[in-house]
Each structure stands twice: as C-alpha cells, then as structure tokens.
Image (tube, helix red, strand yellow):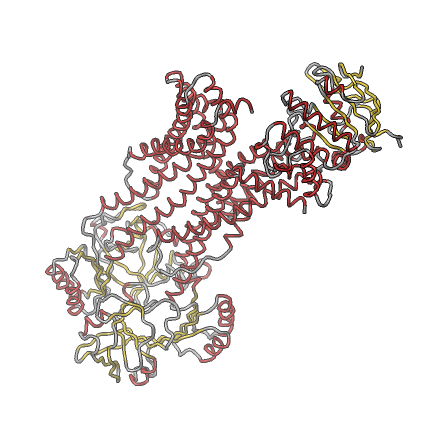
C-alpha cells in the first residue's frame, strides 16, 4: 500500500512503431501525486503530455513500468477492470468536451452515476448541474449549448461521481479567453471544494500556474 | 436495467435526429417485401385448397356403386365432421312426350359441403347461390335439359314413376365433372323422392357418394379412419389429389414471387450494410467516451445490440403491416385470377418470418461492423486517429454470405434449385457490376466535355466508384425487372391480338351425332355463326405402351385419375392445323392413310415419356388397336380451335362409332338461337367459352401486373440503397458544398452539380436496365412464350428518362439539407 499517494507512476514508458522504426513517446517517467494535489503537465506539442495522461488514467497501456491509481496496479487489470476503476475513481474533462450528442445535459451528467451503479442519479445530476449554474439548461442537447456551457456540463459530469482523481486534457483549449478563464475558475473551485486530485494537461501557462505543481515534459521525459 | 434505459434513451434521441431512418427503412422494406408475398402466397394456397374442395363439393368424397354404409356418417358425426350424400344415375326425363337422357343426382340437405349450387329463375339465366337443396317434390333441371325437353319453372317433369315440379333452373353445381363428353344434361332433386321414382331396381347402375367436410385436423384423422375401415370398391378422394396441377402451379408461382421478394431483401441488405457502416463511424466517439467513463466492452456492446433489436422489432412490425396492406392491394389487383371471391384470412407465419428476416439482415450485415465498434479503445477520446482493430475478413464478410445463402435456401429448399439460383444470382451481379463499372468509367471520360456543374457531378460518380456501382446495380435490377415485365405484358396482349382472328370461337359443341352433322352445321350457318373445322371424336382408352400395360405398377404410371388411363378423346385428320407444329417425327402423307399411325401432343409425350416410334395400344369400344407414334406436335391451345392430344391418320378410326365436335363464333345476343339449337339437337353439349376467354386475357394481364407490383418493392429497395449511399457520403458532401460555395459557386451551381450526378446515375441505371430487359424479353418471348419478338424503343426511353427522373428526384430530396446549410456553419464544425 502506498501511503498518501493517489496516483503513482514507476519507470513508465510507451513505445509505438512508426515507419521510421520504434518511437518512444513517454520515456521512463516516474512521479507520485498525493491526494488533493493539483498538478499541471505542460510542454510543447508532441512532448508526450496526452500520452502520459492516457497512461495515468488507464486509457492506454504502457510498454514498460507500472501505474498505481487509488492503490490499484492498472497494469495488472484488463480493459474492463480499468473501466470499472475509472467509473469509481476517475473523472475526465476534455478539450472538445466529448458530450454524447444523443443525450441531454442532464442525461450526460447522469451517465457516469448510472455506469457506477449509483441510485438517485437524476437528483444528484440536477444538483451538480445547478452547481455549475446550468440548472435551467438540463433538458438541452449539446448542440443547443454554447462552447462554455458544454464545457460546464462536461465539468459537472466529471465531478458528479466525486472522483478521487480528475484528469483534464486542455480543458480551455477550445474556448475563447474570457470563457476559458471562467471555466478554469470553476474547475479549480470545484477541485478545492470536492478535495479532488487534479491532473491537468495544458499549454495555458496561466492555468498551469494555478496548480500546486507543474511538471514540464520534453521528448517524452519529465524535465 | 440501466443498460436498457440508456439504450432506449439513446435510440429515441437518434431516432429523432433521423440517423437511424435509413437503417429502419431498409429493414422495413425488406420485411414488407417478404411478408407481403408470404401473406399473398399463403392466402392463395388456402384459396386453391378451398377451390379444390369445391370441385369435390367436400373435403373428402367416398364413392361407391353400392349405398354408402351408415356407420361412416355416424363416425363423422361423432368426430364433429359434417356430411351429406349424393345418389347419381342416368335416367330418361320426360316433359309430356318429349324426353332426354339425363344425369339425375339426388342429394341430402347440406349438399354441397364446399362450393355453391348456382340457380336461376330461367334457363341460361344468371346464377345465384342457392341456400338449400330442392325440397321434396321439386327438381332443379339445368338449362340444357330444359332447352331440350321444353318447360320452365312451374312445369312438371316425369322421372321414373314420379312427377316432380321444376322449382328453379340449375346453372352449375361444384362437382359436375370436367370432361366434355361425360356431361349429359343434369338435374338435381331431393333424395327423399328417390323411392317414389322407383328408379333404383336390382341391377341399376347407380353411383353413391358420401361427402365429408370439416376442420383440417379432424378431416385428416377421419381420412385415416376411412382408409382403415372402407370396403373394397369404395373410392376415396380428397383435396390433395383433386387438382394436383393447380396446386403445383400455385407452389411454383409462390416460389417465384418469394424469389422476387428475395431480390428486394438482398438489395435492402446492401442498404443495411451501408447504414450500419455509417452508424459505426458516427458512434466511435460515443463508445470510446462510454468506456472512458467506466463502461465495459460488454456494456457498450449490449447498448448497441439492444438498440438493433428494438429496431428489428419496430421494422418487423411496420414492415409486416405494410406487407399486409400490400398483399390486400395485390389481391384486389388480381381479383378474378381465383375462382373464389371470399379468400380465407392469412395465417400469422409470415409475421414470424418478417421478424426473423429483420434479425437475420441485422446479424449478417450490421452486427459484424457493430462488434467492431465495441472494440474501439477508450484512448480515442484523446487521439481521434485511433479506431477499432481491423476485423478478420471471415468475420467481416462471413456472416453476410451466410445470411444470404440462408435466405435463399429458406426460399428454395431444393438443393438443385438453390444451386442454380445462387449461381445465377452471382453471375447476374457480376455481369451487372462489370457493366456498371464500365459505364461509370465511360461517364468519367466524358466529363471533360461538359460544363462545370456536370463535371463536378460526374466526377463525384467516378470518385465514389464503389458506391456508384452498387447503386447502379441496385437501381438497374429494379428498373430492369419492371421494364421486362412491361415488355412481356405488352407482347402478350399485342401478340394475342395479332395472331387471333377478331371473332374468336366463343362456343364449343360436342356430342354431335354423325347423322345430324350436316344439319347441325347448316343450322349454325343459318344462325349467322362462323364455324371452324368439324372434327370427329371417338372415345378410347390407352391400354399399353410398347407392350407394357399402363396399369402395370412397375411402369410407374399407376394413377387412377392419371393422364394415361383416363378415357381419351381420339380423332383423325389429314391436315395438320395451323395451330399445330410437328416437333419430332413427321406428319403423314396421303399415302399413309389407313396405316396404324398416331400423332401425339407434346404434353402427352412429357407426361408419359412416349417418343416417336413407340407402339401404343388403345381399347376402342372393346376392340384393341395397335398404332405407332409417327409424330409429336406442339399445340397452341390458346387459339380456342378444336384440338386433340391424340390424332390418328385417316382411314383407321372411321369404323368406330363416334360423334363430332366443332367450335363457332356466335354474335352477342344469340342466346335465343342457342336455346333453339339445344331444343333441336338435344344430345349436343354446348360450352360457352366467351366468358372464359375474357377471363384468360384479364388473368394474364393481372398476373403480369401482380408480378410487377411485387417488383415495385425491388425499386423501393433500390431507392433505399440510394438513401443509404447519400447518407454515408453526407458529411463529405456537406464539406464539398461548403467549399464550393466559399469559392464563389452559387447555390444553384452546387444544386446543378448534385442533380447532374444523380441524373447521370439514374440514366446509366436505366440504360443498363433497358439493355438487360430487352435481352431478357427476347429470350423469354421467343423461347418460353413462343411469340414473335418485336424490338420496342419505348422501354429504352422509359428506362433512361424514368431512371434519371426517379434517381434525381430521390437524390435531391436526400441531399437538399446539405445544400441548404450555410457554408460557415459547416467549415466551423
């Protein structure tokens, strides 16, 4: 058991094959993130930030090394096992929001609760949407919402299960500066309020600066 | 439960967004085509079974020269089966001093158990169904009997020792027999009057029959009991042997229609595959997201499979309802093809078939890509280029091929026919695909010579080559079949009118005594009738072929009602009729007169396998006659001229006692002359074929129309393929349209481009269809119908312009949303 640590990577590497031969995207990365910490991962395009995020969240499997999420060794779980762990412990916010177009705002927020088998999903989702000031837009479909509103729905969806770790991939990347700032504020406010561990991948230095720790990556390595 | 909730919630939303429309449409059309034909065939088969029962006036008929024992009726009553009796004998019926040999049938109440007695208040009147049998003391003579002996309703006729009152005129009874010469004038009466006639004495030739009818299951049980308990000499007939030819014809027609509907189903399968591919493409992100949020692979698969099952149910329900409406409409179209007007209701089997079809199509054509969908990795939420791993070829195409083979086998379970159809279908698709590719290529080469909009449209055809060829094949098939049937319909009607004289014979006269032959013909001529040839008829029975008795069980020809053993009408003639053609052997020369030679119709040869040079023995009035088959003739029966299966050389049969027959055209309104004729020549039997002729023409036309209607489903399936193709290219088209408009093209130019693409596609499909239909029509007309083929330009124009119009209109409807969307919205998305 790893004390205080909610997310830990040990000698994590990811290699992919390319026409030019094997390419190492994440190279021997080790890190330890404790509960309630907020960490920004920054770096230029192609530095390996998103791949590191995918490995830490169990969306992808490493070529070498191990990842522990809430005490579970992700590398020893199969795809469905990792999915179940995500349902219980992990929330996501993406650059392009990734709301399901066929579902309303409320239904999108209810989805992780239902997948985790939590009863009273509707009431919890309504409360959470009200918390992001979208109580009046619950019946709207994603295409009927603005970019900022869509991202607020996505943030509500990410926090609704009270996850141990929240992964955010360029959460303000598709928003104009003003909206981006407001969405960033909401993200940090909820993070503080819910005592969630935040792992944020961003180009936005201002957003990164608000995190407790900044990890810089270059060529697949942590600098 | 949450799985079901989520699946249905997403399904209802996607339904509202129109994403599932094409998939549902394709499934619905397939189910409608199959169930529509299924309902139709089941109802027609049931109607034919009923018709066959009507010929027996019962479901089971037990005939005997001895009275039928009471125990049979007691058993029937105890089993809940209704019964009736008939007693038939030949007797002379008198009206005063005038007499006529008549077939007298005495019946019990309840007769006929199947079919109707048609009666009228006057001779040759219009018949209406009688609700009872003649009351005691009454008789119902038929028109010919009344014409022969005089009398009308109210007259008293003497039958044996009884004097009975004419209450109605019998127009027809269901079991009146079918061969010309067997028909004497007839009369029915109540069985309770039989004792008073004193007609039945020791040694009288009387036929007794017990009639039984009831629920099919009970009848089967009763039939088994009858077979076990009946006495020797009692003959049992039921509907399975009453009209095997008609049943075979219905079976064959049913199979043909099922295959026709299968073509639509297979086209719909293409649309299902296209729609499923688009479904998968559009759901990759959703499935990846569901997995990211914690859904397992089984859960995501469950959501999709549940959605598909719900779609299958919906399509089966709507499709079956449409199929039912379509068959009702088809039945109305072909009313008159069947003798019975009140058709039995359909059974529910086609409903199950419809649902299974929808499931099979989804399983074969939609499930493989959808199984792939469940394999998309969660990582796709971060990297859009990541998709599911490529499937094994066998998994991608195996289920589709298996489902196609299964559907074909389901429709044609005979291995040989299954093989032919599968091979034929594969060859047809290959030829059409090759021709389609060629046309798309040619169109692509011509695009440099047309304007910008047309160039853009035609370029699109070449760019989406595979989709274009698939659509071309789908449309080409639909239009081709419709054109082909149209040509055949026109040929049938046209050729019929061309080959036949304007006034076809509308009456047949048989049983003309040799002594009255000249008088009869002059009587007809005096009445203004145009007679055709007058041919002698001698009755005879074929007894052996090449020395082997035809009743020999080893000959394989044991069939009591069979072609070989039944009493035949024989004739002789020196001339070969214009409607006869010798297909093997040679017609006789004058020098052959008196030699033992015979010529057979090809049907006789097909039925018995007899060929030129074989030796046949006939029993003619107790004398044996040995002859050699000199020729086989193909007879055009539809000319309504007197024709015979068996024709002897002159100088062989003349000594045998016989009668003559002829046919004539009577001017309309000549019914009075007919009554005079029946009075003057009482032994002559008259058959009115005027009505039959009109019916035959109507039947052919309606049958072709019915088949065309079934193929309308094929065209609908073709349209579904078009919709699926347009939908699958919608995002691409939207982008192209936005780009063109950003570059300065007007909305009209973009529309012209899209119309050009669809007009070219439709015209090419029409061209392909017209070519195929003309080649098909040539072979079918000359080889199968044996008519003259005349090239018609109209189908080509109909195919090319009709195809262009149809596809352009459908394509425009399907893509208009793409053109109307503002370019900025598209480019920003």
Q: Could you say which quadrant of the image residue B293 lies in?
A: top right
Snapshot quadrant of residue B116: bottom left
In the picture, measured across the screen, residue B728 lies left or right of residue B491, that is right
Q: Which image quadrant: the C terminus of chain B?
A: top right
B151 lies left or right of A105: left
Q: In this view, does B10 lie above or below A37?
A: below
Residue B724: x and y, percent?
49, 34
Rendered position, B772 above or below B654: above
Residue B82: where, in percent of width, then height?
44, 73
Q: Nearer the viewer, residue B207 or B191?
A: B191
Residue at 25 percent across and 74 percent down: it is B168
Nearest the viewer among A48 and B623 is: A48
Nearer to us in this view, A8 or B480: A8
Q: What is the number of callouts on the image?
A: 0
Point out residue B138 in the picture as x, y percentages from the top left corner: 27, 79
The foreground one among B464 and B246 is B464
Q: Which residue is found at the position 44% from the left and 79% from the top?
A: B69
């Amino acid at each position: 058991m790893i004390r205080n640590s909610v997310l830990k990577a040990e000698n994590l590497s990811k290699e992919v094959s390319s026409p030019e031969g094997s390419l190492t995207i994440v190279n021997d990365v080790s890190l330890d993130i404790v509960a309630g910490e907020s960490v920004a991962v920054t770096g230029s395009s192609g530095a390996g930030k998103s791949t590191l995020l995918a490995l830490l969240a169990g969306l992808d499997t490493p070529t070498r090394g191990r990842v522990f999420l809430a005490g579970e060794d992700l590398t020893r779980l199969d795809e469905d096992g990792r999915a179940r762990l995500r349902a219980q412990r992990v929330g996501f916010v993406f650059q392009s929001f990734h709301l399901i177009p066929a579902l309303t705002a409320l239904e999108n927020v209810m989805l992780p609760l239902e997948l985790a088998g939590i009863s009273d999903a509707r009431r919890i989702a309504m409360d959470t949407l009200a918390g992001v000031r979208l109580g009046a837009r619950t019946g709207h479909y994603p295409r009927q919402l603005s970019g900022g509103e869509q991202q607020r729905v996505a943030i509500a969806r990410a926090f609704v299960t009270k996850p141990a770790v929240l992964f955010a991939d360029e959460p303000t990347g598709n928003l104009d500066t003003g909206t981006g700032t407001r969405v960033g504020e909401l993200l940090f406010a909820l993070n503080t309020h819910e005592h969630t561990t935040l792992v944020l991948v961003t180009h936005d230095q201002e957003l990164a600066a608000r995190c407790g720790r900044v990890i810089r990556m270059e060529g697949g390595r942590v600098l | 439960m949450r799985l079901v909730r989520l699946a249905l919630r997403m399904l209802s939303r996607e339904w509202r967004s129109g994403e599932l429309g094409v998939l549902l449409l394709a499934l619905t059309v397939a189910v409608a085509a199959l169930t529509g034909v299924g309902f139709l065939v089941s109802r027609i088969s049931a109607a034919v079974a009923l018709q066959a029962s009507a010929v027996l006036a019962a479901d089971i008929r037990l005939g005997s020269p001895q009275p039928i024992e009471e125990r049979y009726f007691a058993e029937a009553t105890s089993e809940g089966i209704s019964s009736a009796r008939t007693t038939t004998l030949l007797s002379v019926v008198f009206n005063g001093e005038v007499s006529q040999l008549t077939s007298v049938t005495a019946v019990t109440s309840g007769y006929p158990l199947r079919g109707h007695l048609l009666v009228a208040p006057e001779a040759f009147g219009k018949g209406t169904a009688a609700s009872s049998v003649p009351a005691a003391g009454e008789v119902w003579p038929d028109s010919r009997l009344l014409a022969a002996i005089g009398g009308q309703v109210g007259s008293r006729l003497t039958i044996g020792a009884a004097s009975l009152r004419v209450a109605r005129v019998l127009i027809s009874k269901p079991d009146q027999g079918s061969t010309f010469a067997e028909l004497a004038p007839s009369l029915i009466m109540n069985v309770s009057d039989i004792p008073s006639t004193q007609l039945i004495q020791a040694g009288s030739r009387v036929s007794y029959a017990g009639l039984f009818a009831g629920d099919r299951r009970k009848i089967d049980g009763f039939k088994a009991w009858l077979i076990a308990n009946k006495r020797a000499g009692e003959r049992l007939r039921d509907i399975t042997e009453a009209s095997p030819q008609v049943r075979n014809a219905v079976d064959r027609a049913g199979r043909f229609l099922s295959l026709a509907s299968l073509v639509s189903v297979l086209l719909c399968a293409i649309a299902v595959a296209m729609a499923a591919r688009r479904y998968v493409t559009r759901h990759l992100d959703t499935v990846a997201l569901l997995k990211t949020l914690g859904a397992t692979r089984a859960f995501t698969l469950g959501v999709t499979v549940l959605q598909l099952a719900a779609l299958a149910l919906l399509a089966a329900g709507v499709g079956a309802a449409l199929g039912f409406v379509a068959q009702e409409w088809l039945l109305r179209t072909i009313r008159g093809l069947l003798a019975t007007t009140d058709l039995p209701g359909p059974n529910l089997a086609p409903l199950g078939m419809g649902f299974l079809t929808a499931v099979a199509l989804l399983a074969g054509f939609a499930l493989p890509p959808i199984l792939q969908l469940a394999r998309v990795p969660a990582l796709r939420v971060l990297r859009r280029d990541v998709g599911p791993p490529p499937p094994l070829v066998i998994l991608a195409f195996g289920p589709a091929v298996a489902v196609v083979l299964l559907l074909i086998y389901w429709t044609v379970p005979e291995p040989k026919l299954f093989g032919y159809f599968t091979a034929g279908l594969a060859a047809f698709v290959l030829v059409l695909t090759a021709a389609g590719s060629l046309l798309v290529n040619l169109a692509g080469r011509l695009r440099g010579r047309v304007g910008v909009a047309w160039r853009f449209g035609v370029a699109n055809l070449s760019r989406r080559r595979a989709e274009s060829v698939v659509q071309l094949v789908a449309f080409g098939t639909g239009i081709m079949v419709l054109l082909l049937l149209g040509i055949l319909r026109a040929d049938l009607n046209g050729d019929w009118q061309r080959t036949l004289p304007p006034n076809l014979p509308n009456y047949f006269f048989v049983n003309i005594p040799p002594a009255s032959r000249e008088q009869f013909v002059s009587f007809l001529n005096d009445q203004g009738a145009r007679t055709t040839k007058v041919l002698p008829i001698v009755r005879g029975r074929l007894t052996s072929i090449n020395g082997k008795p035809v009743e020999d069980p080893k000959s394989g020809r044991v069939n009591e009602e069979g072609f070989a053993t039944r009493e035949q009408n024989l004739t002789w003639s020196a001339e070969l009729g214009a409607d006869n053609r010798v297909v093997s052997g040679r017609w006789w020369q004058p020098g052959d007169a008196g030699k033992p030679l015979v010529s057979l119709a090809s049907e006789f040869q097909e039925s018995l396998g007899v060929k030129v040079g074989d030796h046949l023995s006939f029993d003619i009035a107790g004398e044996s006659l040995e002859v050699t088959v000199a020729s086989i003739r193909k007879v055009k029966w539809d000319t309504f001229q007197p024709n015979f299966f068996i024709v002897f050389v002159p100088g062989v049969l003349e000594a045998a006692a016989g009668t003559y027959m002829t046919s004539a055209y009577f001017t309309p309104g000549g019914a009075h002359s007919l009554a005079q004729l029946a009075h003057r020549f009482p032994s002559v039997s008259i058959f009115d074929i005027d009505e039959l002729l009109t019916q035959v023409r109507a039947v052919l036309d309606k049958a072709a129309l019915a088949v065309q209607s079934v193929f309308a489903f094929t065209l609908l399936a073709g349209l579904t393929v078009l919709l699926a193709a347009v939908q699958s290219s919608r995002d691409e088209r939207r982008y192209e349209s936005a780009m063109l408009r950003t570059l300065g093209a007007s909305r009209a130019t973009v529309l012209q481009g899209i119309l050009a693409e669809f007009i070219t596609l439709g015209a090419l499909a029409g061209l392909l269809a017209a070519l195929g239909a003309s080649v098909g029509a040539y072979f079918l007309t000359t080889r199968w119908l044996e008519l003259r083929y005349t090239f018609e330009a109209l189908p080509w124009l109909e195919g090319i312009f009709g195809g262009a119009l149809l596809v352009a209109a459908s394509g425009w409807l399907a893509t208009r949303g793409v053109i109307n969307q503002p370019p900025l919205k598209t480019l920003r998305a």
